[in-house]
Image (cartoon, rainbow, N blue to C red):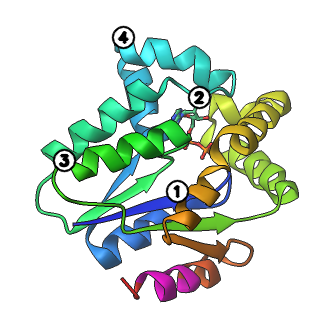
Amino acid sequence: MKYYVLFGPPGAGKGTQAGAMVTRYHLCHLSTGELLRSEISAGTALGLQAKALIEAGNLVPDEVVEGMIEAKFLNTKGVEGFLLDGFPRTLAQADALDAMLAKTGQAVTACVSLMIPDALIHERIAHRATIEGRADDARPEIVENRIKTYHAKTEPLIEFYKKAGKYQEINGVGSIEEVQERIFRTMDQY
Ligand code: ADP
C-alpha cells in the first residue's frame, strides 16, 4: 500500500488537487477536515467537541484525528493506497502515523507538499469563503489564526519528512492544470 501525505498551508489547493490524484493512483482520499465537518453536521459528541476548536481556527486534539485515521485504515478495502489530506498536522501526529503503519511493516511513501506564499493563502481563502460557506473561512482573524497555527505546529513537518528523505515540494502557484501536471510528474516516480 502507498501512503501519501498531501501537505501544505490552508488554501494551498490540497482539496482541489486530491480528486485527480486519487483517480490516477487508485487511492482512498482521507481528509481530516472533511471527516471532522461531517461529524459536526451529524451532531456527534466528537463533532460537538471539534466545532468550537475549528471555528476558532485551532487544531482538534491529536488523539481525535489519529483515531479517525486508524479506523479508516482498518475499514477501507480495495484501494492501492491512501492520500492523507490535512493529516498529520503536528509532529506528534506524524510520529503516531509512523507507529500505526509500523504495526504492519509499512511506512509513509512520500510527502507531497504544495507550497504557496502567505499572501496567496489570504486571497484563496477569501475566494473560497464566497463559494463554500465554511465558518472557519469567513472571518479574517480566524484565517489569521489558522495561518499562525500552520507556521507554529505544522511547518516543522517539512524538516521531519526531509530528514526521512520523503519530502517532495511542488510549486502550488499556477493554474489547477499546471499544478496537477507537476504533482503527477512527482508521484509517477513512486
Ligand atoms: P484547511 O487545510 O483549509 O485549513 P481543513 O479542512 O484541512 O482545512 O481543516 C479544517 C480544520 O479542521 C483545521 O483548521 C483544524 O481545526 C481541523 N483539523 C483538520 N485536520 C486536523 C488535524 N490533523 N489535526 C488537528 N486538527 C485538524
Decide: is 44 above or below 139: above
Asked whether mark 2 lies closer than 8 Å to ligand 1, one says yes
Residue 40 quadrant: top left
Q: Main secondary structure of the magenta part?
A: helix
Q: Amino acid at mark 4?
A: Ala
Task: Tell me what residue is drawn at x 65 percent, y 49 percent.
Answer: 156
Decide: is 4 above or below 87: below
In the rendering, at what x and y percent does residue 166 appear?
A: 48, 70
Task: Tell me what residue is drawn at x 40 percent, y 87 percent.
Answer: 188
Q: Which residue is mark 3?
A: 103
Q: Amino acid at mark 2?
A: Leu
Tell me the element at label 4: helix
Q: Is residue 161 left or right of residue 79?
A: right
Asked whether mark 1 lies closer than 8 Å to ligand 1, one says yes
Disc on res. 45: 4
**Alpha carbons under labels 2 and 4: distance apart:** 17 Å
**Alpha carbons under labels 1 and 2: distance apart:** 18 Å
Q: Amino acid at mark 1?
A: Gly
Q: Is residue 184 magenta?
A: yes
In the rendering, at what x and y percent does residue 108 appear?
A: 36, 61
Magenta range is 181-187
Q: Nearer the viewer, residue 28 or 127?
A: 28
Which quadrant of the rendered structure holds the C terminus? bottom left
For disc 2, the neighbor class at 10 Å (few under 14, some 14 to 19, many from 20) is some
Q: Which residue is mark 2?
A: 59
Q: Amino acid at mark 3?
A: Lys
Tell me the element at label 1: helix
Task: Choose the circle earlier in sequence order: 4 or 1.
Answer: 1
Of tags 3 and 1, the one toward the viewer is 3
